[in-house]
Amino acid sequence: MKDRVKEFKRIPASELIPNEKNWRRHPREQVQAFQEVLDEVGFADVVIVREVDGGYEIIDGHMRTGMLQDETLPAIVLDLTDEEAEIVLTTMDPLGAMAQKNDEKLDELVDGLAEDLKERLKDIPHMSDEPERDDSTPTREPLVCPECGHEFGG
């Protein structure tokens, strides 16, 4: 296994360079829900970046960076080529979304939350009993790894 983590450092959000190929869009509800978590817990994640000429380009964490422009953020710096960065940018969220929900464990976690926090977080997917989206239907051609030919998504 290749370890692509080069270093951990704290970088001012205002100095991070948005990735021009970022495909994610963040609806108001997501931003509000994230703000609720920030207000309750604080920042508990890292931004994933890679070093490029002129600074650090964001691979994951565009919304967090945009919301916290006046802050210094914890970041993991990866050693990736342009092509590898595109693979990570393309697949990180879809791979995470493939995880299945354990309703019993989630119910235990939610039951332990304060009532006001439960109410504020109810619009987050997986936190409510509303049906989940079915993202299993392919919407585009799969991404093919140029090195091994493995297909991602579709």
Image: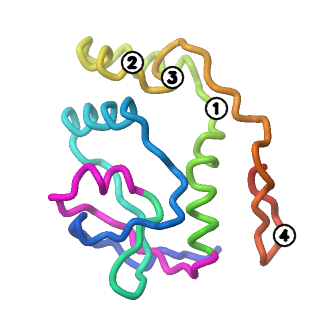
In-image side of 50 versus 68 (left or right): right
Viewer-side residue, 143 vs 115 = 143
Q: Which mark is residue 122?
A: 2
Q: Earlier in the sequence, mark 2 or mark 3?
A: 3
User: Disc 1 vs disc 4: which is toward the camera?
Assistant: 4
* Residue bearing the label numbered 1: 100
Return the x and y of residue 139 as percentages of the image width and height. Answer: 76, 43
Q: Earlier in the sequence, mark 1 or mark 2?
A: 1
Q: What is the CA distance from the residue labelled 1 to the residue labelled 2?
A: 18 Å
Q: What is the CA distance from the residue labelled 4 to the residue labelled 3?
A: 37 Å
Q: Which residues are magenta?
A: 61-83
User: Disc 2 vs disc 3: which is toward the camera?
Assistant: 2
Return the x and y of residue 105 as percentages of the image width and height. Answer: 51, 22
Q: In the rendered view, would you say 52 is above or below 67?
A: below
Q: Which mark is residue 22?
A: none
Residue in the image at 26% along x and 49% along y: 67
Secondary structure beneath label 2 = loop
User: Disc 4 vs disc 3: which is toward the camera?
Assistant: 4
Residue in the image at 56% along x and 49% along y: 93
Amino acid carrying mark 3 in the image: Lys
* Residue bearing the label numbered 3: 105
Q: Earlier in the sequence, mark 4 or mark 3?
A: 3
Secondary structure beneath label 1 = loop
Amino acid carrying mark 4 in the image: Gly
Amino acid carrying mark 2 in the image: Lys
Q: Earlier in the sequence, mark 1 or mark 4?
A: 1
Viewer-side residue, 69 vs 128 = 69
Instruction: Tell which residue pokes out farthest to the front in this image.
Output: 20
User: Circles 1 and 4: CB distance less than 8 Å?
Assistant: no
Amino acid carrying mark 1 in the image: Gln
